Amino acid sequence: MAAIAETPLVDAATLAAVATEEKIEEELLRQRVAEGTVVVMGRAGGSVRPLGIGLGLRTKVNANLGTSPDSCSLETELRKLQAALAVGADTVMDLSTGGDLDAIRREIRAACPVVLGTVPIYQMAVEAEARWGEVVKITGDHMLEVIEQQAADGVDFMTLHCGVTRATVAALRSEPRVCGIVSRGGSLLAHWMDVHQAESPLYERFDELLAILKKYGVAASLGDGLRPGATADASDAGQIAETRVLGELVLACREAGVPVFVEGPGHMPLDQIAGNVLLMKQLCYDAPFYVLGPLVTDVAPGYDHITAAIGGAMCAAAGADYLCYVTPAEHLGLPEEQDVIEGVIACRLAAHAADLVKGVPGAREWDDRMSQARAALDWEGMAESALDPGTVRRVRGEGATRDPKVCSMCGKFCSMKLQVTAAEQPPDCD
């Protein structure tokens, strides 16, 4: 493998820190960053923990939080942030739409030691309505102003719905959907283009947008504004048309020296997941792939963290690199703190299950530690090796038995205890 002398997107100390964390050769990581198959955010020695996303690395997990017009408490969102971090979220996104958005974002940024993302079109819409009374009166200049303001506040990446164009919306409408456009950003842009009979400024002025991102060292997360919001709508003309455009934009980002990854579908039946990952990787030149779920059925409101974990595990096993959590409150309301915890745990479970299949360094060793602790009836070792140690200790404590070595289900018939006891018996000397 030829050495790559310099990777301008990442400084040497940060690259070394990520390589160590991921148990990967530094030179291989450097090459993948240069090729664009890995994105690195954060900075060694800085306030944001370095993080790598992409080929050969551990599948990462994102947690969304943020205010809404109906629930606008910064203190609540900061508690959600701490809850998400406590159970292992790798990144956080601020999706706030209520209150003083600049102040809320800055407070979350100050309290967040991990990579932070935003969706600027939410603030664009809120400000347009406040200034002009209608969202559709937003201008291209204002869109770029909001992007620059968020970049200046230290955001690490932004979801940008630049693939929602007149052509991709026309493709979607050529094949009517059950749920239409479910992305808030996608629907806002489609409505703006309909009213103005003009191309989306986020697509038309993409070069200007990239100049802002490069200036502030912000990565582009190319949003799937036309993602399917029902399993019946998966893999349709609109989704594929947008993905083709996102592939073109990936090349533009790389040429401009802006780190880029691509977002993927939200609802999709099991039998379409692997094919979609392969198609996305092909159309988007092997850029890291970031997916919401995907949710594999539409019938489980209240349990969509589970439907998303099923889809996320399959998606990541097929090659997706980054999973956005879904909480039990999905489709129902703003998540509470416990929803955030359950969403992160379910998503981390999906990510790790996929990492076992992908052969990510350290994944099998983690499972082996748990298996060895179980074989030895080492309950504290099991807790220490668990995805959620606190739950293990709580449930174990509630199920106390006369024999501390076994659980309350099997008791004296514990198969592991029988094996351990047999192993401890002296050999037969007769």
Image (spheres, rainbow, N blue to C red):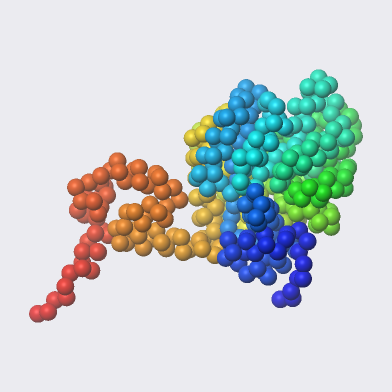
Which residue is found at the position 70% from the left and 47% from the top?
156
Q: Is residue 150 above or below residue 279?
A: above
Q: Position of residue 135 (x, y in %)?
A: 80, 26
Q: Position of residue 391 (x, y in %)?
A: 39, 44
Q: Position of residue 177 (x, y in %)?
A: 70, 35
Q: Is residue 300 left or right of residue 231?
A: left
- The residue at the far left in this view is 430
Q: Quadrant of residue 281?
A: bottom right
**Quadrant location of the C terminus in the rendered image:** bottom left
Which residue is found at the position 22% from the left and 61% from the top?
418
Q: Is residue 355 above or below residue 103?
A: below
In depth, the one of 152 and 403 nearer the eye is 152
**Quadrant location of the N terminus in the rendered image:** bottom right
Which residue is found at the position 51% from the left and 55% from the top?
353
In depth, the one of 166 and 94 nearer the eye is 94
Q: Quadrant of residue 139?
A: top right
Q: Position of residue 349 (x, y in %)?
A: 50, 50
Residue 95 shows in this picture: no
